[in-house]
Image (cartoon, helix red, strand yellow):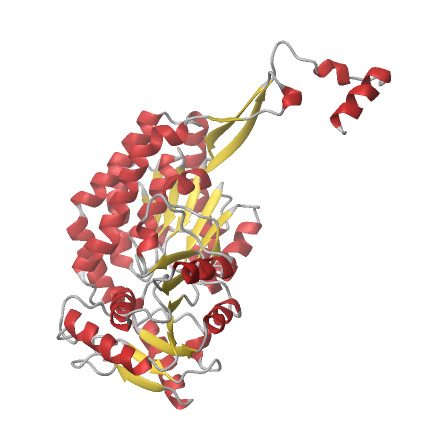
Amino acid sequence: MGSIEDSAVSAATLNDDLARQRSAFARDPNPSRQERQRRLRLLEALLRDNADALAAAIDQDFGHRSRDETRLLEIFPSLESIKHARRHLGQWMRDQRRPVSLWFRPGRAKVVLQPLGVVGIIAPWNYPILLAAAPLAAALAAGNRAMVKMSEYTPRTARIFSDLIARNFTPEEVSVVEGDAKVAQAFALLPFDHLLFTGSTRVGHSVMRAAAENLTPVTLELGGKSPAIVGLGYPIGHAAERILVGKTMNAGQTCIAPDHVLLPAGTTETFLVAARAVVNRCYPDMARTPDYTAIVDQRQFARLTGYLDDAISKGARAIPLSDTLTSPDGLSRRIPPIALAGVRDDMQVMQEEIFGPLLPILEYVTLDDAIAHVNARPRPLALYYFDRDAERVDRVLRETVAGGVTINDTILHIAQDHLPFGGVGHSGMGHYHGREGFETFSKKKAVFVQSRANAIGLFNPPYGKLFDALVRVLTR
């Protein structure tokens, strides 16, 4: 079988699964291009043919998750990442010729990319298919075996994905692990050849400590407070539309959702009017529309309403942006987009990643102020800047550090398969997507090929006058 049931999961079971994949890798340590293509085609067909069933499972796990959003935000980008890998696999697998210093010619140098072995992938609950399938595609393209730990907060999705993987792959190729946080801890302690974790910064600390026990290299895709800055003179209505569309996708439960907005001084009311118009146009009946997603569980719902209550108690002004759902609904776990004006740094909503549809609004006087706001905080996973002045855009890009940036829109940098995706500092480390994903899960082996005719013997001991003369030439 290719999955591990909750009741059967133990450290010994996980180690057995890893040992089985290691043995298979030892028998075929560098799968051919044809074999890698076969595995990618299986994954592609699995997702395409079962898209409706996967969307239904996610819908059930969330209490309500827009099936159209699942198709757009999970199935489509997953398929695109696989197709991109299949299209470019031959090019990625080629040895990379590198120049050789004059002193070592006519020797030759190259980089050979080899599979690492067995890759561990820990997927989160917010996009359970995309954030399992996209790194899995990169690992398989690079020639690895893989074990995937699905989130316990989306158990139906985990179950169907596990079943589909088991039906299409041997357990020596890919296995799926289900289970709670204790299983995840045991999973992170396995001596993988590489471990990729997507989730919160808090849990990322634990994953990195666990991986350090085996010196397992890690890629951490975390989160943080991704700001959206609206530049001076940029049309407020357009900025409001793109920010609110990015914020309401998956009800804000997106690692790169705009966390808060920085507006030019005096434009908050204009932004609020435009934002309310956007929300009412996109979700005319937010309480019942199938297009708006619920908060995944009561724990997350309570966390978000707690942030809201804390902000209001400390003086923030809460402005619901929907005319039909004006406050959080505990029964359906729907929270409308709610703007928060007059926020301060001592409020929880300004200290923690929001991961929901609350939208703090701040104003700035000069671009210096906006840049200083970003640079005074942990480096974000994403930054959004709206401006049509090329010099100011260039300045923001040069003077801030973020995992990724979209200019004059939100979210879209993650959908570019030719761009790396990853955080920096508290928002993560390492990259994947496209070629960067292939290289993350590969060993770049340096190879120097000595020429039959060479002068390296002139540097052998015993050293003398000829050696001295040669070294003087080398070090002049």
* Left or right, residue 231 beside residue 97: left
In the image, 406 versus 73, the foreground residue is 406
Residue 160 at least partly seen: no
The residue under the point 44% across, 72% down is 352
Which picture quadrant has residue 473?
Answer: top right
Asked if 389 appears above or below 38 in the picture, the reply is below
Circle count: 0
Q: Is residue 461 above or below residue 321?
A: above
In this rendered view, identify the residue nearer to me: 330 or 343. 343
The C terminus sits in image quarter? top right
Q: Tell me: residue 144, above or below residue 355.
A: above
One can see residue 77 in this view: yes
Q: Residue at x 29, y 40 (%)?
A: 82
Q: Image check: 255 left or right of 202? A: left
Q: Which of 150 and 139 is in front in this view?
A: 139
Asked which quadrant contains residue 174, the reply is top left
Q: Which residue is drawn at 16% across and 66% down?
A: 291
Q: Residue lying furthest right in this view? A: 464
Residue 385, x across and y down, in percent? 38, 64
- Percent x, y of residue 407: 35, 59
Q: Residue at x 22, y 45 (%)?
A: 47
In the image: residue 348, left or right of residue 279: right
Provide residue 139's location: percent of width, then percent of height: 39, 39
Residue 165: give x, y in percent of width and height: 27, 42
- Please state, as top left, top right, bottom left or bottom right, where the N terminus lies in the image: top left
Of the pair 219 and 424, the residue shown nearer to us: 424
